[in-house]
Image: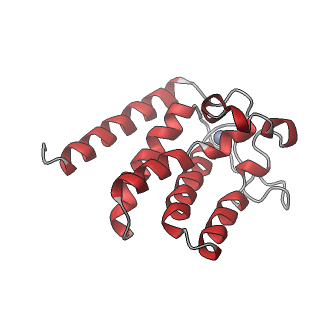
Amino acid sequence: MMGRTHMAIGFLAGLALFKLFDSNPLLFICLATLGSLLPDLDHEKSMINRLLPVTRWIPWLFRHRGFFHSIFPALIILFAGLIFSFQMIALPLAIGYLVHLFSDCLTRQGCNLLHPFSTFRIQGFLVTGGLVEFVILGIVLVLDVLILARFAGLV
Ligand SMILES: [Zn+2]
């Protein structure tokens, strides 16, 4: 999926879930959105690598949709958060990360969530950048705006 779709979905996940945790809503939503971009650190031309030039070496070491598209980096983020007591940062980052993986599972290229321990890929029917993805992006953006408007007391 495209970076903008991942961002919109990560933002939606942050909006939908921040109330479940005793955390700052703005921080939670921003971190979930950031987390939703992190798996694509393994892609040379991804939005996150365009935003953060310091991470551009990652695609040289990790192939696209390999380790960075498994659940393990999200688990590492969660464990690090527990060990070093920054759960309120780690949790939304991991949520955004996992939401990215599950949405990439809807694409034809799919995701191997247990890489490198398995070769099983979960694949869907979506073409990255295709019409259906734009429809999903439109629906998610409308939901983002409606939920924000509701929080702001406008709806
Ligand atoms: Zn991805």
Residue situated in front as seen by the camera: 54 or 146: 54
Q: How is the image coloured?
A: secondary structure
How many marks the image carries: the answer is 0
Q: Residue at x 55, y 56 (%)?
A: 93
Q: Quadrant of the C terminus?
A: top left
Q: In the rendered view, does 78 fall on the left or right side of 22?
A: right
Does residue 27 sit above or below 126 in this rendering?
below
Quarter of image, res 148: top left
Q: Nearer the viewer, residue 112 or 87?
A: 87
Question: Residue at point 77% right, 60% down?
Answer: 114
Q: Position of residue 7 (x, y in %)?
A: 49, 39
Instruction: Answer with left or right where residue 136 lies relative to residue 85.
Output: left
| Residue at x 72% of width, y 55% of height | 70
Q: Position of residue 34 (x, y in %)?
A: 53, 45
Question: Visible in this render: residue 109?
Answer: no
Res 25 visible: yes
Q: Eyeballing the image, is 142 above or below 67?
A: above
List x then y, in percent, for residue 87. 53, 69
The N terminus is located in which quarter? top right
The quarter of the displayed image where residue 3 is located: top right
Name, please, the residue furthest toward the left: 154
Q: Residue at x 77, y 38 (%)?
A: 64
Does 143 sit left or right of 57 as displayed?
A: left
Ligand 1 quadrant in view: top right
Percent coordinates x, y for residue 2 in the rendering: 57, 31
Q: Is residue 130 above or below residue 88?
A: above
